[in-house]
Image: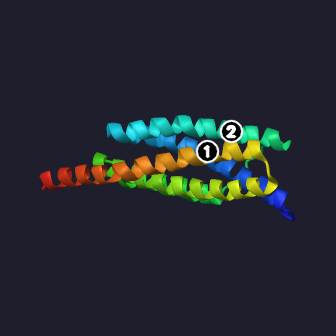
Amino acid sequence: MAIRTLDEKFVHDLGDIFDAEHRFLEAQQEMLQHAHAQTVQMLLTEHIAQTQQQIENIGQIYKQLGVAPERVRCDAAVGLVSEGQKGLKETAGAPMVQDVMIAGACSKVEHYEIASYRGLIEGAKLMDNTPVLALLQQNLQQEEQTAMKIEQNTPILLNQALSANQMGR
């Protein structure tokens, strides 16, 4: 589909993050089954609930715009999910390393989502659409908080994996 106007670009980008959120939700649910550390399980469980809310928020944005919700294939999300699934396979049998890998994969996802929402927020500001802007800002705030939690916990997970590795020698 040719994109000729900023409104069309906004709806396209909205469809992209709508697809990404759905893909990431499925991936988080899969990773939760492989998470070992309580911290990783808690982060995933919390973010699964947030992702479900973010998908609902995007649905509300579509209603505000008077446009039918449509997922636009997000190749970046496809790649990030594929990379995460590959990492799960490669770290099977090393639980603490797998937890570090899960945290890293989630961090990459968060930064993609943050960039996407920031772009959409700029578009909503230009459209002067306050209800849409508020929903996008809510999603962005959740993504930024999740990214921060992952970044705060990653050194702890790394140290736990390192200690376990050294003890195993």
For residue 32, above or below residue 137: above
Residue type marked 2: Asn
Which image quadrant for residue 87?
bottom left
Q: Is residue 158 above or below residue 40?
A: below
Tag 1 residue: 139
Quick one: label 2, few (<14), some, or many (20+) residues within 10 Å? some
Badge 2 marks a residue whose secondary structure is helix
Image spot of residue 126 (x, y percent): 78, 58
Contact? badges 2 and 1 (CB < 8 Å): yes
Q: Nearer the viewer, residue 118 or 90?
A: 118
* Residue 107, horizontal then vertical, whole percent: 46, 54
Left or right: residue 169 versus residue 14 is left
Q: At 73% from the left edge and 51% from the top edge, which residue is drawn? A: 14
User: How many numbered discs, if any?
Assistant: 2
Residue shown at the point (73%, 48%) measured from the top left: 71
Colour scheme of the rendered structure? rainbow
Precedes in sequence: disc 2 or disc 1: 2
Q: Is residue 2 left or right of residue 50?
A: right
Where residue 119 sits, quadrant-wise, is: bottom right
Asked whether, in this view, residue 49 is left or right of residue 13, the answer is: left
Q: In this figure, which residue is indicated by the disc labeled 2?
A: 57
Q: From the top left corner, tell me how far across and down residue 101 is, in percent.
A: 38, 53
Residue beneath the point at 68% across and 42% down: 135
Residue kind at label 1, given as amino acid type: Asn
**Quadrant placement of the N terminus:** bottom right
